[in-house]
Image (cartoon, rainbow, N blue to C red):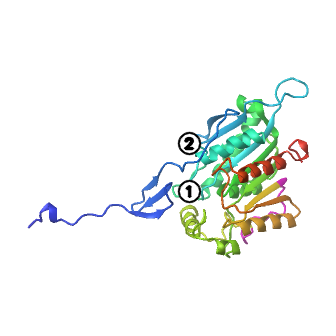
Amino acid sequence: MSMPASSLPETAGPYVVEDCGDALQVLSDGTIVRSSPPAAPVTDDGRVEWKEAIYDAGHSTGLRMYRPRRRHVTDTGEGEEKLPVIVYFHGGGFCVGSCSWPKTHAACLRLAAELPAVVLSFDYRLAPEHRLPAAHEDAATALLWLRDQLITSDNPWLAESADSRRVFVSGVSAGGSLAHHMAVRFGTAGLEPGANVVGYILLMPGLFSAEPTQSELDTPDSAFLTHEMFDRFFRLGMPVGATRDHPLVNPFAPDSPSMEPARVGRMLVVAAELDFFRDRNVEYAERMKAMGKDVELVVFAGQDHGFFGRDPASDADGELVRVIRRFVWRNGNGNQ
């Protein structure tokens, strides 16, 4: 005998199994739910013009390009001076983030205006839909796209303003880790003849190992990046079965390529005093210096992970932009 509909047991619907806050949730049936990006103040005062483009049609991955509206006239008076190029990879644990997110947009507007520079902010495929090394593959494709654009001059927007002799590869958090791997792969000469990479800028890069550091152990639950969030991003982003000594995340693991022979030019490493990754960032800079690399380390007192862009008007953001400006324009022209 059939039961009345009202007495039939209810079937439970999908439920959240991985919760990365408002930006990303994974449901029990495998559904990925992505929400609107977190709000952030964006000051677009007209000093910078920007546009979007696609660099890999096959994966529908794109970028935002920024340049100051006004540039200095050359010494000969024949046109405007070309500017250094800053490649920028956003953060987000390889699971969230985009060049279109307000935080990223605000940071790139300020970099373009105040360095000044041409800033290219690249998206890359995200986990868990696309686990690593998808992001690394996309970062390499992005740099090769830039090389080809600069060789052919088919992109008037870049040809008018970008100095191919002065390219810097940068990123924050997960993007800083990508910048490290691009240094391993391309160094300073790997994009020639189209682009000359002068150096690399790693902002609070997401580097770690199986052995916890004191800054990891000291990170409170109130931090911007907590142990729980880190563990969740690791589960969602890394290849299945990967350990924390995987070469994708530990640059000094036994199976990681040696940095000794790498010609990385100049390198700026920025750490935050209250960051989960602080000790690893400091160790990275010190070990690179010990190899004879030209590395500048700056630790921001009182700041937490990924502070850049959360409040573009903050003193810390302003000082970070000045640090990057001094680094890029060292010796007066952005070259070594």
At horizontal 55% and vertical 48% (from top left) the residue drawn is 39
Residue nearest the viewer, comparing 36 with 288: 36
Labels 2, 1: front one: 1
Q: Quadrant of the N terminus?
A: bottom left
For label 1, count other residues whose C-alpha is less than 10 Å away and answer few (under 14), some (14-19) or many (20+).
many
Give percent across and percent down for residue 253: 72, 70
Give percent across and percent down for residue 90: 64, 51
Residue 218 versus residue 158 in the image, above or below: below
> Which residues are the magenta region?
252-266
| Real-space CA distance between mark 2 and mark 1, rounded to the nearest whole angstrom | 17 Å
Asked where in the image residue 41 lies, by quadrant, the reply is top right
Which label's residue is closer to the chain start, 2 or 1?
2
| Labelled disc at residue 60 | 2
Give percent across and percent down for residue 46: 67, 32
Residue nearest the viewer, comparing 285 with 186: 285
Q: Is residue 43 left or right of residue 182?
A: left
For label 2, count other residues whose C-alpha is less than 10 Å away and answer few (under 14), some (14-19) or many (20+).
few
Q: Which residue is mark 1?
A: 95
Q: Main secondary structure of the magenta part?
A: loop
Residue 194 belongs to the span the image colors magenta: no
